[in-house]
Amino acid sequence: MARHKLTETKVKAALKAGKTDKLGDGDGLWLYVQASGSASWVFIWIRHKLRRELGLGSYSSGVRHVSLADARDKAEAVRGILGRGGDPFNELPERIAAVKPKTFGEVCDDLLAAKETTFRNEKHKAQWRMTLEVYAKPLRKIPVTDVATDDVVRVLRPLWQDKQETASRLRGRIEKVLDYAKALKLRDGENPARWKGHLDHVLGERRKLKRGHHAAMPYVDVPAFMVRLSQAEGLGARALELCILTATRSGEVLNARWSEIDFDAATWTVPAERMKAGKEHVVPLSPRAMAILKALHEKRLSDFVFPGQAPRKPISGMAMAMTMRRLEVGSFTVHGFRSAFRDWCGDATSFPRDVAEAALAHVIQGVEAAYRRGSALAKRRKLLEAWASYCSTTNTGKVLTMERRKSEIDRDAAH
């Protein structure tokens, strides 16, 4: 194909003409001339039956002036890229130099968006985001291609002695961000956050830490707390109340959907993907739990039982914890109510251990597993109704005494 059809004289004449024009230099290189006297170079080609245009700069008297000779050099570079099947938009040297490299923080955000549907629950997602935004803050402004071992160690070392579990999880998440960047060809080489054979030599072996338990409110104090909780307003309070009455985990409650509630059977079926054990769990609902759900159902605005402010999302994973903070219950945790329930089952009732474990959706083996079938639901219903009844007791004398309540619970357990 003929090339070099233009001359500087032809170009300048076209600019002085004061009209829109399109001048071809041959083999894909064109000069678009505007009536105002400005002009710009464009390279045009067709690939897979699609017409593509790539701007090569302006023909002007400014500092960024692209002369006819310059335009021809750029056009030749584009032809070379096209000749080997490449993409000039991504591979032209001047375009690569002009692209601002992504920072570690930007890649973090991209990874979190990509993992949106893979997190176990909202709490898990929030933990990822918090650690990468707060603890890894010194890395966020560094171009991801430049993150080095020293940078990672600088973030991890302050946490390694006192918060080793947190530091270990943070290291793993940093490693995943950098692996993600490498997969997208945003960096190359070894991962500076790799543990085995790398950071283990720098930070030293992890200590085996004793795992603490979630601070649990003593079950004898739960009824008084439930009175205060029932009087508190807001979705967080209702979610916490339902969580306590059903002895479930916070993530199971916060992500509950109306399609999971069977008002006729008075059950709530939590799907396997939201259960820690990965198995569907049917929760029998006590009258008080049903009353909470019916009241919320009358005012429903979303598929979620506890809708958040953002469309198609539930309330925050911190909603229940914030409710407890407002009620000033000290260090007690939401998860601790499961322990309170289990202690109550063992200390204050005659319900079999198997039924209590099944109510908590704990993985059980052998003969105990039989309670997953047959009459398990009926037995668990009696247990959770007894728990809800216990939670409604007070010390005012206007309700059954604890001794009489225990005798009624024992009678239910025997049947």
Image (spheres, rainbow, N blue to C red):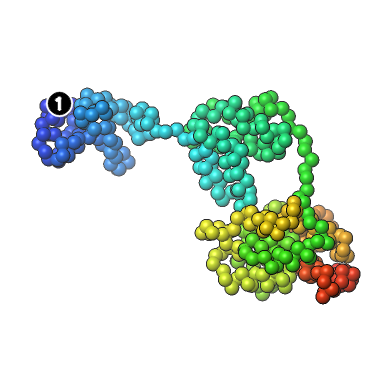
Where does the image place residue 48, in percent across and percent down from the top left?
32, 41
Where residue 193 appears, x then y in whole percent? Answer: 61, 31
The percent coordinates of residue 173 (x first, y second) are 61, 38
Judged left or right of residue 402, residue 334 is: left
Is residue 173 depicted above or below 372 in this figure?
Answer: above
Q: As rendered, which of 208 and 400 lies closer to the eye?
A: 400
Vertically, is 25 above or below 259?
Answer: above
Residue drawn at point x = 69 percent, y = 24 percent: 201
Looking at the image, is 346 positioned above or below residue 295?
A: above
Residue occupying the point 47% across, 35% down = 102
Amino acid type of the residue that numbered disc 1 sits on in the rendered structure: Glu
Q: Quadrant of the N terminus?
A: top left
Q: Could you tell me if residue 284 is visible in this image?
A: no
Give whichever of 329, 339 is nearer the camera. 329
Residue under numbered circle 1: 8
Residue drawn at x 60%, y 44% is 130
Residue drawn at the location 60% of the way across and 34% of the way down: 175
How many numbered discs, if any?
A: 1
Q: Secondary structure at mark 1?
A: helix
Q: Dot 1 surroundings within 10 Å: few (below 14), some, or many (20 or more)? A: few
Q: Quadrant of residue 242?
A: bottom right
Q: Quadrant of the C terminus?
A: bottom right
Residue 116 visible in the current orientation: yes
Viewer-proximal residue among 358 and 143: 143
Quadrant for residue 409, please give it.
Answer: bottom right
